Amino acid sequence: MHNSGTIRGIELLAPARDCATGMIAVDAGADAVYIGGPAFGARVAAGNETKDIAALVEYSHMFGVRVYAALNTIVYENELKDAEKIARELISAGVDALIVQDMAFLRMGLSGVELHASTQMSNCTPEKVEFLREAGFSRVILERGLTFAEISEIAKVEGIDIECFVHGAICVGLSGQCYMSRSMSRRSGNRGDCSQPCRLTYDLLDGNGNTVIRGKHLLSVLDLNLSGRIPQLLDAGVTSFKIEGRLKDANYVRNVVSYYRMAIDKALKERQGMSRSSSGRSIYDFTPDPSRSFTRGFTTWMLDGKKAGQASFSTPKATGEYIGKVTATGRDSFTISGNTPLNPGDGICFISNGELIGTNVNRAEGQTVWPNKTEHIVPGTAIYRNYDHAFNSRLNRSRTRRVIGIKADCHITHGILSLALTDEEGNSVCVTENLDPEPAKDPEKMENTIRSQLSKLGDSIFATDNIAMTVEGELPFIPVSKINAIRRRATELLIAERLRIRPEQASAIENLNFPYPSTELGGEANITNSLAERFYRDHGVTKIATPLDLMQTLTGQKVMTSAYCLRRELGQCLKQKHTLQGPLRIKRGAITWLLEFDCTLCRMNIIKE
């Protein structure tokens, strides 16, 4: 949401597998954290109890960091009461927003919380975003497969925040429009239980049924990294920059969040009218580098337009950072080009005969490496490091912390000490203490001791940026223990004050007079309960098809729509010179899917046969 003449709060949004990981994200510089609720989250393996989310909320709110709970699956009719109960419990726990896919949440009478429209709603057009604003959403989370031009058009919609993924795994299908998992088993991505069929191997068949490609990861794409495009997206109007990874470990979160914190801060320094949306600063003891955490290799995906080079046919696993090529091999070692040293304990990998093979480094001297096994390593082999032992050890030992700058005013007069603390946002508290009349034997030393003890805030979330001290009359002797107690009491009061002034969350207000962009909804819309159905009918939808997730079989149904195109990836685009004759199919075991190419929208559809 951007209004001229006001400061636009810019948010770095981090994933949290659990409370502990969420706190690490906060320390690393996140302005907001998203975490799965007890149920109905799109990552069934990343659910959290409400009490743990409440603990994360309390920690986060000290820094002005917001917490969003993901309830972003579809809800069945018999689950409506449970879904509402969980939503209300999360609101009571203090979450700032609920991330939802199912419109049923708009009809539950929830108050005191924002509703964010999940990327699972497949948010791709300004018309859809306008409708979501009028439906009561304060924020929309964009589909990952949009170009910069498409993002820019959507960001022109006034009155709603725009959230954009900038890092992590990519869903190859349009979010919320993928039923590939459900077409192979009862596991559904729209129920938080995707079996990740896009990471499996398939055969590609041509129009004559001939196998053109055998046993390759034809739908497995690289990971997103838009860190170099933060300035461009800021100028377009994006409010929140989201990192994917609610299943990732703590070191991934610590490393990647720190990296994006620095990138966003650098961009904000070069712009007016924007500022980060939370308080404090992070103090790092390592240099962040996303290539040293889990990655399949990086891409800007569709941001610069639709082009080839997005997939990794050989493996869906993490390859990590490129180290160099093997120049020579010995009996149990190899020599490598490049200047990046390998170390004992590192995990390395390479591709041989189209398959990813991994091993560990036992010893390394200069450019000569002794791995655990040398089989399949030959001159010319490209070596990648997918586990940096030294870097991860530094992350494990990291004491990265986040602090809020404060100003301390200490005034001593007539046997009374007054200590006022004011934080960087102007919140202020004051404590007073009666002192013993005994004068200090060395007033200068006593004053230095007071200053020193007031600045010792290592056990709190604060750091003293400035200490002002005035003394009227004779300076009394004050024991160090009393100075420390006064300091602790003041910091506790300031934390309580920061938590007390949390702004009230706006509730969703639905405009019943605003029509949905279409009067018909297909099975891919997945309207699985009466509240959602009533919502859409109230907004002018007259025809609602049977939801795909409730069908017994998906034979003949479109189970994926994707901005990714296998023809384009293979250099066989139908708009250009091509030799591969269709219709094309992919096959795994006994199941085949027809590939349908929509050249008008430049999309690929997958239909189960």
Image (tube, rainbow, N blue to C red):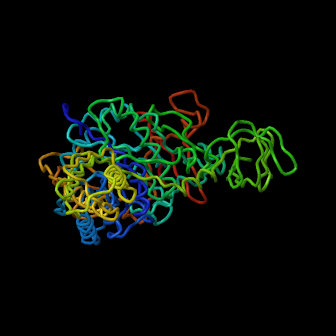
Q: Residue furthest front?
A: 441
Position of 189 with respect to 105 (left or right) is right
In-front residue for pair 289/350: 289
Vertical order, 306 against 556 (above or below): above
Q: Is residue 542 visible?
A: no
> Residue shown at 56%/51% (left/top)?
294
Q: Looking at the rendering, which quadrant does residue 536 occupy? A: bottom left
Vertical order, 3 against 555 (above or below): above
Q: Residue furthest top?
A: 577
User: Measured from the top left, where is residue 136 in percent x and y?
Assistant: 19, 50
Position of 103 with respect to 119 (left or right) is left
- On the rendered image, what quadrant is the N terminus found in? top left
Q: Looking at the rendering, which quadrant does residue 381 occupy? A: top right
User: Measured from the top left, where is residue 359 in percent x and y?
Assistant: 72, 55
Position of 561 with respect to 470 (left or right) is right
User: Measured from the top left, where is residue 236 in percent x and y?
Assistant: 32, 32
Vertical order, 384 against 599 (above or below): below
Q: Residue furthest right?
A: 331
Vertical order, 270 against 197 (above or below): above
In-front residue for pair 254/526: 254
> Residue shown at 43%/46% (left/top)?
561
Position of 237 with respect to 314 (left or right) is left
Q: Is residue 60 visible?
A: yes
In-front residue for pair 539/404: 404
> Residue shown at 36%/54% (left/top)?
449
In-front residue for pair 266/473: 473
Q: How many marks?
A: 0
User: Measured from the top left, where is residue 553 in percent x and y?
Assistant: 44, 63
